[in-house]
Amino acid sequence: MDVQAVLKLADELVFSKTGKHLEYLQEAILRGAIEDRKYSQIAEEFHLSEGHIRDVACELWKILSNVLEENVSKANVRYILERAKFCNYSAIEKNYGTVNNVNICPQTPQSPQVTQQPQQTPTQLHIDLGDAPEIFSFYDRTPQLATLETWILQERCRLIALLGISGIGKTTLAVRLIDQIKTNFDYVIYRSLRFSPTLDATLTNLLQIFSEKTDIPQNIETQISQLINYLRQYRCLIILDDVQMLFSSGQLAGQYKTGYEDYQLFFKLIAEVCHNSCLLLNSWEKLRKLAKLEKANTPVRLLVLGSLGIAAKEILREHKLSDEDTWETLINTYQGNPLWLEYTATMIQELFGGSVSDFLECDAVILSESLQAQLDQQFQRLTQQELAIMIQLAKENDPVALPQILQAIPLSPSDLLNGMQSLGNRLLLDAKENGKTTFFSLNTVLKKYIKNRYNIVS
């Protein structure tokens, strides 16, 4: 039986199950499996990631397994299809527009007129944005939108972490992303974790979207299994915002609160188990162990949002500020953070008549009460060793290396290194390499905040 005959039979079987013919990539993967080619070779040929090829292959094997009623894999697909051909089941009969079941070498006679159950798919796009904020202004994040779209639609990543300090625009970007790619999904769901719901509560809430409340199991493992089945059955985009609220305050970054540890297993399973969907997580803090999953051949990605850059001029324009030639200085001073600039622009409009030049003449950095209160929320989460490191860095005029920090702070090397790593995971440190040495510093806003709060004199 030649390769083309196997491909033809597989196409007939897939059509009998789904009403759709093999896509070009599915056919290429099947041909590669028959020719004993590696996934990496197929990925290279089509300029795609190996993880994406594996995802498409996983779905193809699942479809064939359902049709043939036995486990189909890359290793055995040719043998099973050839056996199906020899068993004389390649002819798929059509009667008045209906497609009959295809049974491969049945042990007992079965009626040939059993009607195939239609595949369960939503009749229309189902969008449930819950408590997602309404976005009135969106400032250019074209590169980041393009990156996320590529990861989700082309590379079919299963888990993406969108990271950034509070106010940088993660939620705004996620909501804009929904509007841009929603038609590629059966379900689009947004949920905030700002009130720290347990995993049981989150899973129950998500499962209610797909099924009746009475059908939802009580066991966490069963709930996860049921949700993953829906993620396989449908193409879903689920956004969980404010993930940092699952983590403990007063402990190193990324440590789950007591009773919330199951989230870590849930996220890991979403990343590792084969399905058709994507889970996007927004957080101030990096998730522990997620970086280990972010490898070239895994469907996991991390994106850290930084400054808006010159696109932030639109914020100042909306506040009708003057002295446009000084706007870039203001943007750089406040790190291109949309929320920080909103607070500052409001102060300039109310107290300086909209003059950015007059505002900049007062001091290098001025923090409004609203901005300081917003930073309080993040600093309340720090450990004592992290706070000691931040205070020391606020005293430094230039970036410093670890040995200098260790000499200046009465911390053990272990506590210092863990504290530095945790601050990095909270995205509160600026790090630059010079040769083989890494130098650390704080941005101007954080440095000013610490000096204000802890009465540090330069």
Image (spheres, helix red, strand yellow):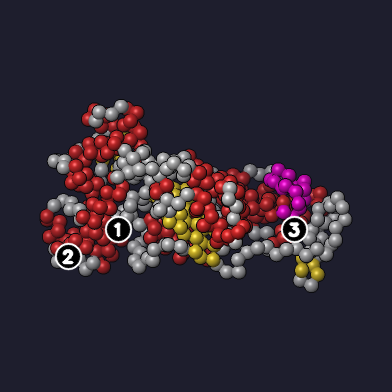
Number of dots carrying numbers: 3
Q: Nearer the viewer, residue 351 or 293?
A: 351
Residue 324 at x, y percent in the picture:
20, 64
Does residue 249 appear in the picture of this structure? yes
Does residue 15 appear in the picture of this structure? no
Q: Earlier in the sequence, mark 2 or mark 1?
A: 1
Q: What is the residue that sits farthest to the right in this orientation?
A: 109
> Would you say the residues marked 1 and 3 are in contact, meaning their CB atoms lie under 8 Å apart?
no
Q: Earlier in the sequence, mark 3 or mark 2?
A: 3
Q: Give the side of residue 230 with respect to residue 8, left or right.
A: left
- Give the foreground label among 3 and 2: 2
Distance between mark 2 and mark 1 Cα atoms: 18 Å
Q: Residue at x 39, y 58 (%)?
A: 171
Q: Earlier in the sequence, mark 1 or mark 3?
A: 3
Q: Which residues are magenta?
A: 66-81
Residue 232 at x, y percent in the picture:
61, 54
| Mark 2: amino acid | Glu
Residue 113 at x, y percent in the picture:
83, 64
**Disc number for residue 13:** 3
Callout 1: SS: helix
Q: Residue at x 82, y 56 (%)?
A: 89
**Disc number for residue 338:** 1
Quarter of the image that includes the C terminus: top left
**Disc number for residue 350:** 2
